[in-house]
Amino acid sequence: MEVIASVNKLRLKFPGAESLLFKDFSLSIRKGEKVLIVGSSGSGKSTLLQVLTGLIPSSVEVPMKVENIKIPLSWGFVFQDPESQFCMPYVDEEIAFVLENLQIPHDQMPSYISYYLKQVGLSFDDMHTKTQILSGGMKQRLAIAAVLALESDVLFLDEPTAMLDPEGTEEVWNTIKEVGEDKTLVIVEHKINHVVDFVDRVIILSDNGEIVADGSKQEVFEQYKHVLIDQGIWYPDAWKDYLLANGKPRPQSTGWDSNSAITLTDFTGFRGKNKKIEIKNVDVFPGEWITVLGKNGAGKSTLLHAMMDLIKTKGVYTIFGQDAKKINKLSDYAAFVFQNPEFQFVTNSVYDEVAFTLRLEKWNLDKVSNKVEELLEFYFLKNHEHSHPYQLSMGQKRRLSVAAATVKGQPILLLDEPTFGQDAKNTFAILEQIEYLRSQGTIVIMVTHDLNIVEHFSTRVWVIDQGELTIDCSSSEYTKGMHKVVG
Amino acid sequence: MQLDFSFRETWLHKINPSFKFILIVALFIHILFIHNINIIINYMIGTAILYILFTGHPWKRLLIISIPFILIFLTSSTSMIFFGKGEVTWFKWGLIHITEEGFFRGLHLGFRGLVFATLGIIFALTTRPVYLFYSLMQQLKLKPKYAYSFMAAVRLIPIMFEELQTIRYALKVRGVQSQKGILGFYHLLKSYSIPMLSQSIRRAHRIAVAMEAKRFSDTTKRTYYYLVGFSKLDVYLLIYFVVVIGTSYYFANSYSYFPIQDVRYNN
Amino acid sequence: MGRALKLTDILVTIIIALIFGLVYKLWGPLYGFVSVFGLHAEQLIYGMWFIAATVAYLIIRKPGVALLAEVAAAHGEFIFGGEWGVTTLIFGLGQGLAAELVFAAVRYKKFDMFTVSLAAIASAGASILIDFYYGYIGDLALWNLLLLIGIRCVGAVLIAGIFAYFIVQALEKTKVTNLIRPVSSNDYKDLDK
C-alpha cells in the first residue's frame, strides 16, 4: 500500500529541555490504515502528530530536523480541548471559517455548513447557535465537522475525548467511526476502550520517544499488556485487572460514630437570584464516601460550592452540631479540591504549596516541615518539591491539589471530578489515597461520572437532577439497580 | 457584546460597523473643539434621544447601564470645579477654590464625558463584534490575522469570567486573606493574573495552532461568510448627527442656558 | 529569527490585552469612586491603564506588541461598553504608541524594570498630553496640575513598571512563556549532538 505520511530519522528537542525528545525516529503510515498511538504523557505522541502534519515547525517553532518527511496532501486535525480549537462564537461561523480559508464562494456556504453538520449527526433548528451552550461531546463533533470541511483523506486525532464525560466520549467515537470509514486515521489516545474495535495497527511509544511496539492490535495487546498497565493506559480491562491485582473489598462505612456529622435540611444554594440546588433532608456520617452523580449542569458542582459556603445558601446546614454559617472558618472543617488544580495553586513551589495553609495557621517551623515531608512522601511528590506547581504532570498536579487541600486533616473532603482526565495509574493512586483518608474517618463527597468508582470505592450515592437530590442510597443498592436497568 | 440579552433590532444595528466606528471617532475629535457649554448640553440631548429610542433595548436595562454615567459626570468635573482657574470667586476654603469659570468648565467636562460615554454605549449596544471585524476586513482592509485573533479572543471572554470566579472561590477556600495597602494590592493583582495569564497564553497558543490546522493563512485570498455593505441607513445616521450638531449650534446661540461662549481660561 | 508578529503572537497579545480590558472595565467604577474627592488620589491607580502594553512586551518581546496590546485593550473596553466610550480608544492609541517608542529606542533588546518603567512614564506622558485637550487640565490651578502629573507618573511606574515586571517574572516561573518566546540557536545546535 502507498505510504501516505512518514518521517525518517526525526530529531526533535523542546527549547530548554535537557535531552532530545526524538532521536532518529522513523515511522510510516500507509493509506487507509487506522493507527492508534499510545504512550504515557511526555512520550511525545502529540508532538509526533504535529510533526506528521507539518504544524511543527510551521505553526509551532520547535527545533527539529529530519532526513525525509512526507506530509499528507490533505489532512485534518482534531485537538483535545474543545474550548481551545474554536475561533468563532457560533456553530455556523465556525465551519464557515474553514470554508472561507478554502475560498468557497459566499453563497454556497450555508448548504455546505448544513451538509457537514449532518455528517457528524448534529442538527439545529437554527445553525446560528452559540457553541458555548453545546455539551462537550457536541463541541467535539462540531470540531470534526469543521475538519471534514477540509475534505481531507487523513485525519489526525489528538485525544479528542480526553475532556469529555462517558456519554460524550461514546458519541464522539461513534461519529469518528462513521466519518472515518474510508479515511486514514491516526489516533493518539489514552482511553482506548472505544477505539480498539476499529483500529488495525497499534504503536506504543516509550517515555524516551522510542517505538516499543508496532503491529496488529491482537499482537500488541497480547504481548505488551504490561506496558499498557505501566503507562496507565485505560484499556478495556483496566479496572478488572486492577481489582484482581489488589483484591480490593468494597469499603464499609461502619464502625464510626453513629451521630451524624453533617445535616442538611431544606438546604438551598443560589447563583445570583436563581435557586440552583435544593436538598430536602440528609445526614452524613463519618467514614462515608458519597459519589455525586448527575448530568452536566444538573447542579453537582453547585452543591459542593454551597457546602463550602462559596455561594449564597438558605436552610439548615450543621457540621458536628454547629450551624455552618456561624463557623468562622469553614475551611477548618472542610477541604475542597477543584476540578482544575491549577486554579487553586497560590505559591511557586510544590513544597510551599503544601506548607501554605500551615504557615497561615502559624505552625512552628519543625512541625510544618515534618507534616509537609510526610504528605509529599504519601502523595509521591518528594522528588518534585522544588518544582513550580504548573510544571507538574496532570497526575502530579492532582495529587498536589489534594495534599495541599487536606493538609489540616479536615474531617470533610469535597472533590469536584478529581479523576477527570487522569490516566489509569494516577486514577487508582488518587483513589487509594482518598480511600486511606476515608478509612481514617474522613467524610468524602465526590462529584464524578465514573460508575466504577461508585461500584468499587464509594459507600453511598447521591443523584442530582435539575438541581434536586433525587436518589440517595447506598452504593451497593445503586449498582444493583444499575445492572437491572442495563439488563 | 450584549447579544446574550434579548433586544429589538433597530436601524442602528444595520448601520455599516466600520462607518459607525469612523463616524463616532470623527464626532469625538470634533467635540474636542466645542468649548461652548450650551452646545454640549444640546448635543448631549441629541445623543440621549438616540440612546433611549433607537438602541432597541428595554428601558429598564438602559436605565441600569446609565447608572455609572453619574460617576462619569462627577469624575470628569470635580477636580475642575474645585481647583480650576478663574477670576470670579464663589467659594474659598483651604485648597478648594471654586470660581465661576472653573465651575462651568467643570460642568462642560462632565457633559462632554456624558456625550462620549453615550456614543460609546450606543456603539456597543448596537454592534456585534463579529460584524465589526468582518466589516473592518472588507471596508478598511484590516489584515485577517488581526481580525480573527480578535474574534477568537472575544469568544473566550465568558470563559475568562468563569475562571475569574473560580480563582475567587479558590483563594477563599485556600484561606488567602487580602492585605491592605500597596503590597496587598500587588498580591491581589498577582494571585489573579498569574493563573489567568498562564491559562490564557496556553489557550491562545492552542487556538492559533488549531486555526492554522484549518488552513488559516494571512497570505492567500479568502471569501467571507458575512458580506457587510453600505445602505441608505448609513446616510440617515450621518444626517441625524448633522442635524443634531446644526441645531445644537443654532439653539446655543438663540436660546442659551448660560451666558458663556467658551469655558477655557484666557479666552 | 523572525521578528514579524505571527498569528500566535497576535492572538496571545490580544488575549492578554482583553484580560486587562476586563480589568479596566471593572476598574472604571472603582476609579470613579476614588476620584470624586478631586485631589487626584485616583491618579495613583491610573497606571493600571498602561499595564497591558508593558506586560505584553515583557512576555512576547517583539516589536509592535505594546501598541497592539494597548489598542486591543482599549478596543476591548470599548466594545464591552466601557464607561469612557470613545475616549478610551484615543487614549489607548496614544499610550500604546508612547510605550512602543520607548521599546523601539532600546531596540527591543532590554526587558528590565527600568525600561518598562520608562515606557510607563511615556504612556503617562501621552495620556497627560491628550488630557490637555480633552480635560482642559491646563486650566487647573498649577499646584493641582503638578499634583496630578506627579501622582499619575508615580502610579504608572508602580503599576505598569514595577508590578508588571514582577508579574511577568512570576509568570516565567510557570514556564508558560516558553511557548511563545523565540527559540535560541543553541537548541538547534543540540540536534546534531
Image (cartoon, rainbow, N blue to C red):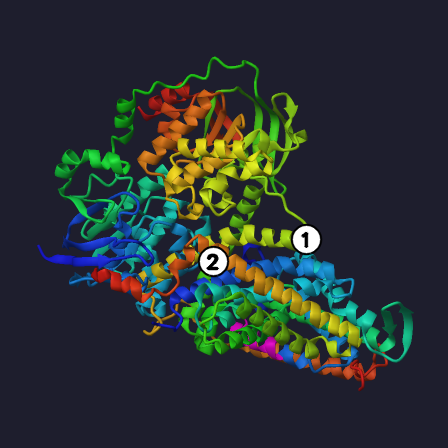
The disc, 2 or 1, on the residue closer to the chain's N-terminal end is 2
Residue found 74% across the figure and 70% down from its top: C147
Q: For mark 2, name the chain.
A: B
Q: Which residue is mark 2?
A: B155
Q: Is residue C114 left or right of residue A328?
A: left
Asked if residue C93 shows in the view, the reply is yes
Q: Position of residue C165 (x, y in %)?
A: 53, 61
Q: In the current view of this chain or complex, which residue is farthest to the front?
A: A366
Q: Quadrant of residue A112?
A: bottom left
Q: Amino acid at mark 2?
A: Arg
Q: Is residue B61 left or right of residue A479?
A: right
* SS label for mark 2: helix
Q: Position of residue A172 (x, y in %)?
A: 31, 45
Residues in magenta?
B15-26
Q: CA distance from mark 2 to mark 1?
A: 35 Å
Q: Quadrant of residue B221?
A: bottom left
Queried whether the magenta region covers residue B22, the answer comes back as: yes
Residue found 50% across the figure and 78% down from its top: C105
On screen, residue B101 above or below A115 = below
Checking the image for residue A361, the label placed there is none
How many residues crowd mark 2 within 10 Å: few (<14), some (14–19), many (20+)?
many
Residue depth check, mark 2 versus mark 1: number of the one nearer the observer: 1
Q: Which residue is mark 1?
A: B181
